[in-house]
Image (spheres, helix red, strand yellow):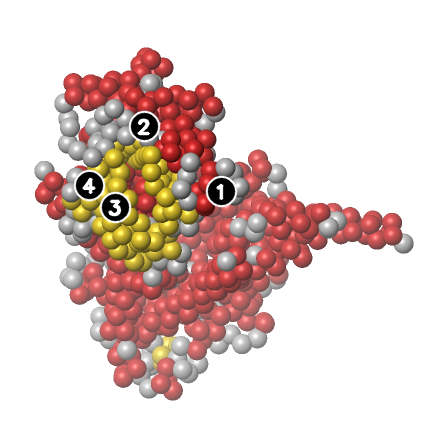
């Protein structure tokens, strides 16, 4: 079933650069959907539309609809705060907030009004276990988060989104700054997570796209070129442009 | 020929560097000299009686307590008005304002506020607070006048401190379901606090040392008692120093230097605190 | 819960926005009150009398502000001659020559000078500088425009240093490295590359320093002798003068509200306000222009 349905989405930034052109796409529930393609193709822009983070940037025009569970989230009347709790996000560079490890994890919940310590502790443990970080940090939850290594920080960021019990997780090149071992841990965590969550991933390489994708969408200069099942896309793409990119002829 | 040229080049450089260094030395030495001179000359005047007593014999004897307390009140009064307003204005400029004509107008206004002569602030305070709003010559009128004068310092240093907080913190906080204000309060303000504090103290330091803005808005030549309410006039250290060094004949020089010393220590302490906060925050910062 | 959150957010945002705009309101308020109290002077004193050379407001209603204008100008000019070279020199030293530890000491020290109360400098001017100058230059009195200029120069220096140093600091390191790579000495780099690249910021520094000097009140009131004499030649530099700021500070306490004298003092305040407005708008437009140019080049 499609969790997210994108209909004829177009978007242009105030500085004149067009970022998305008439994109229509359905994103499956409880699966990893990969958005890939060369830089500047509009993948990150699309990702940032899904939790309305683009509200922070100067957008000139936008058209189309994005339906999550049947509701158009681009509607001005949407409760964006609730939306962002439902749609978690992990960024390319691990940005831990200047708080303790625990403080990072409980930040969103406290904002949502959760004050009970037992609930908060439960959320900390559950999300850290899901992000495969619990064993490494359980002894030092009150240390500053900045003291963690890069790979640990990124998994903390993932755990931080999970603590809010979202339904959808957006990941924007989450492993671009990590070594192969840390990358492997994050990818493994994603394979576990997809049993419960809808995951939209912008990978940092075609190889990663191939390793993780259940479904894949190929973007080129703001246009959705091809969409299909992951395996098929990377072995026998229908479009010439997709094939050229996947086989490394450009990009 | 070529060697001569090279020699020449390096000679010029040596001479030039010496000249510039000399200028820097000539700028800095009088500052240190001034401070040390006043500390040395005024040191003899300092006693418990001088700090805790009232002036008598036409201010030619006794202490300066009412002036010390007065400056303290004025500084607090200035802080009450200028700190919240200044920080809020800085938050607006750094977190909310779009880059448009109105924002530029605000910035030009702040630059102009910073440049308006202090005595003109005094006139303004007289016109608006003392006469028009009928606060009279009072601590309230003087504090309000000093607040507006202090505002540009607080705004510009606080804005700088807020802008230094990485943008990514804001994005992450918003993505976790925080509103803009929650993000500012929980993350941005907390990180910018040392910088804001430095700016606030530097602004108040200037207010504490000013004379011209309080001349006609709140300063009293002599008061036999401490002020009771914000609507009373008050003595103040800088004005008192002005009075006893120009208006009172046969003033004992000890008392003059002693008063200058107390004012200097008041101001220097604030300055040192601000400098220490800033350098410690820089050393501790992790981004 | 969500509702109250929205309301709080809304009110706080409004308050913050209002605070942001308060700066504009204050400038307008200041101008309005100066106009309100100062413009009646134009009705009460004929323009020719206002711009005459005699200022004796107590006996004989002579409200000629020319001596005060020239007094302010000559003291400021003297201060500029001192503050510009020393200010820029110190800024160059701090930003280009000084080792790091030296910079860490010098910057707070210069900032300290900016924080010294002007009344303390005036006090030392009376007790130390003026007697010294009188003996050294063999003058009838040490309380002269020159004494004021020396101290005002000191007061303007921190402004010049901090703005000029920011400007020098903002010159990209690549410019300097490029010059060194071409074989320029550090001295040549400073003169031919760094300073020219920072010139708009340095110009702003000079203007703001001058603005600071024109507006200074207590120091000049205490050390310039306060004689309202037309100052037209260089020799006036070594005789007593009286500035606009000092006149307001010295006389406002003694006039009755609403009198002609009172209105004229506000009129002088208005002139001072307009001068500082002019200086600051000019200074900031230099910065904005330079920034626009930089943006054009970079884009």
Helix, strand or loop at label 3? It is: strand
Identify the residue shown where x is 32% and y is 74%: C267
* Residue in front for this viewpoint, C223 or B83: B83
Q: Residue C143 versus residue C88: which sits nearer the camera?
A: C88
Looking at the picture, does residue B5 appear above or below residue A227?
below
Is disc 1 surrounded by few (<14), some (14 to 19) or many (20+) residues within 10 Å? few
* Alpha-carbon span between mark 4 and mark 1: 33 Å
Pointer 1: what residue? A244
Q: Looking at the rendering, in which quadrant would you find the N terminus of chain A?
A: top left
Asked whether the residues under marks 4 and 1 belong to the same chain, the reply is yes
- Of the numbered discs 3 and 4, the one sitting upstream in the chain is 3
Point out which mark residue A158 bears.
Answer: 2
Image marks 4 and 2: residues in contact by CB distance under 8 Å: no
Which chain is mark 3 on? A
Between the C-alphas of marks 3 and 4, the distance is: 9 Å
Q: Position of residue A190 (x, y in %)?
A: 33, 25
Residues packed near mark 4 inside 10 Å, few (<14), some (14 to 19) or many (20 plus): some
**Residue in front for this viewpoint, B182 or A11:** A11
Cβ–Cβ below 8 Å for labels 2 and 3?
A: no
**Badge nearest the viewer, 2 or 3:** 3
**Residue under pointer 4:** A68
Q: Position of residue B188 (x, y in %)?
A: 31, 39
Mark 3 closeness class: few <14, some 14–19, many ≥20 residues within 10 Å: some
User: Does the residue at mark 4 contact the one at mark 1 (Cβ under 8 Å)?
Assistant: no
Label 2, residues with CA under 10 Å away: few <14, some 14-19, many ≥20: many
The first of marks 1 and 2 along the sequence is: 2
Disc 4 vs disc 1: which is toward the camera? 1
């Amino acid at each position: 079933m499609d969790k997210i349905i994108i209909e004829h989405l177009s978007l242009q930034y105030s500085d004149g650069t067009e970022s998305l052109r008439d994109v229509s796409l359905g994103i499956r529930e409880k699966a990893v959907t990969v958005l890939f393609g060369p830089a500047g193709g509009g993948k990150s822009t699309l990702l940032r539309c899904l939790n309305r983070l683009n509200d922070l940037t100067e957008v000139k025009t936008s058209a189309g609809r994005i339906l999550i569970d049947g509701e158009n989230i681009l509607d001005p009347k949407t409760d964006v705060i609730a939306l962002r709790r439902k749609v978690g996000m992990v960024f390319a560079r691990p940005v831990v907030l200047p708080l303790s490890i625990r403080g990072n994890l409980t930040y969103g919940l406290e904002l949502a009004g959760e004050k009970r310590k037992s609930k908060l502790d439960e959320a900390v443990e559950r999300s850290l276990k899901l992000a495969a970080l619990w064993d490494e940090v359980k002894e030092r939850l009150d240390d500053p988060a900045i003291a963690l290594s890069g790979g640990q920080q990124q998994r903390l960021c993932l755990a931080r989104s999970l603590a809010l019990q979202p339904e959808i997780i957006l990941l924007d090149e989450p492993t671009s700054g990590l070594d192969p071992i840390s990358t492997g841990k994050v990818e493994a965590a994603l394979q576990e997570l997809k049993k419960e969550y809808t995951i939209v991933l912008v990978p940092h390489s075609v190889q990663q796209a191939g390793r993780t994708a259940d479904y894949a969408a190929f973007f080129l200069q703001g246009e959705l070129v091809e969409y299909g099942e992951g395996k098929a896309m990377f072995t026998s793409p229908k479009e010439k442009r997709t094939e050229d990119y996947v086989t490394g002829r450009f990009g | 020929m070529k060697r001569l040229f090279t020699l020449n080049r390096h000679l010029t450089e040596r001479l030039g560097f010496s000249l510039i260094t000399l200028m820097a030395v000539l700028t800095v030495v009088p500052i240190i000299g001034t401070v040390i001179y006043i500390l040395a000359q005024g040191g003899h005047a300092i006693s418990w009686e001088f700090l805790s007593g009232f002036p008598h014999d036409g201010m030619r004897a006794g202490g300066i307590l009412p002036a010390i307390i007065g400056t303290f009140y004025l500084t607090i009064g200035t802080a009450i008005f200028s700190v919240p307003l200044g920080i809020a204005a800085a938050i607006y400029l750094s977190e909310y304002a779009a880059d448009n004509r109105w924002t530029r107008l605000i910035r030009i206004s702040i630059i102009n506020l910073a440049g308006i002569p202090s005595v003109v602030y005094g006139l303004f305070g007289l016109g608006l607070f003392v006469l028009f709003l009928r606060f009279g010559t009072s601590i309230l009128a003087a504090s309000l006048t000093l607040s507006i004068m202090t505002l540009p310092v607080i705004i510009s240093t606080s804005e700088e401190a807020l802008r230094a907080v990485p943008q990514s913190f804001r994005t992450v906080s918003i993505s976790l379901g925080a509103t803009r204000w929650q993000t500012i309060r929980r993350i941005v303000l907390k990180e910018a606090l040392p910088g804001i504090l430095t700016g606030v103290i530097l602004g108040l330091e200037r207010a504490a040392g000013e004379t011209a803005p309080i001349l006609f808005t709140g300063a009293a030549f002599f008061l036999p008692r401490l002020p009771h309410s914000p609507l009373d006039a008050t003595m103040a250290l800088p004005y008192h120093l002005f009075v006893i060094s120009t208006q009172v004949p046969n003033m004992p020089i000890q008392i003059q230097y002693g008063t200058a010393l107390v004012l200097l220590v008041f101001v220097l302490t604030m300055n040192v605190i601000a400098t220490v906060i800033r350098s410690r925050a820089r050393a501790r910062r992790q981004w | 819960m969500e509702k109250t959150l929205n309301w709080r957010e809304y009110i706080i945002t409004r308050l913050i926005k209002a605070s942001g705009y308060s700066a504009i309101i204050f400038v307008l308020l200041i101008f309005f009150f100066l106009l309100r109290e100062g413009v009646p002077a134009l009705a009460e004193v004929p323009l020719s009398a206002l711009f005459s050379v005699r200022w004796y407001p107590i006996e004989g209603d002579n409200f000629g502000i020319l001596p005060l204008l020239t007094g302010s100008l000559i003291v400021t000019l003297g201060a500029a001659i001192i503050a510009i070279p020393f200010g820029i020199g110190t800024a160059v030293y701090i930003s280009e020559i000084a080792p790091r530890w030296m910079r860490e000491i010098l910057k707070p020290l210069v900032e300290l000078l900016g924080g010294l109360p002007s009344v303390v400098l005036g006090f030392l001017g009376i007790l130390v500088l003026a007697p010294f100058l009188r003996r050294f230059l063999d003058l009838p009195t040490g309380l002269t425009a020159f004494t004021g200029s020396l101290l005002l120069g000191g007061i303007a220096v921190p402004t010049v240093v901090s703005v000029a140093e920011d400007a020098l600091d903002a010159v990209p390191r690549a410019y300097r490295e490029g010059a060194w790579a071409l074989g320029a000495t550090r001295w040549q780099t400073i003169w031919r590359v760094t300073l020219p690249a920072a010139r708009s910021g340095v110009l702003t520094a000079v203007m703001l320093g001058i603005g600071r000097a024109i507006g200074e009140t207590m120091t000049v009131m205490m050390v310039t002798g306060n004689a309202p004499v037309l100052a037209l030649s260089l020799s006036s530099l070594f005789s007593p003068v009286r500035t606009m700021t000092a006149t307001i500070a010295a006389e406002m306490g003694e006039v009755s509200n609403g009198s002609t004298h009172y209105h004229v003092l506000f009129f002088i305040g208005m002139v001072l306000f307009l001068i500082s407005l002019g200086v600051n708008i000019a200074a900031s437009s230099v910065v904005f222009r330079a920034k626009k140019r930089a943006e054009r080049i970079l884009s």
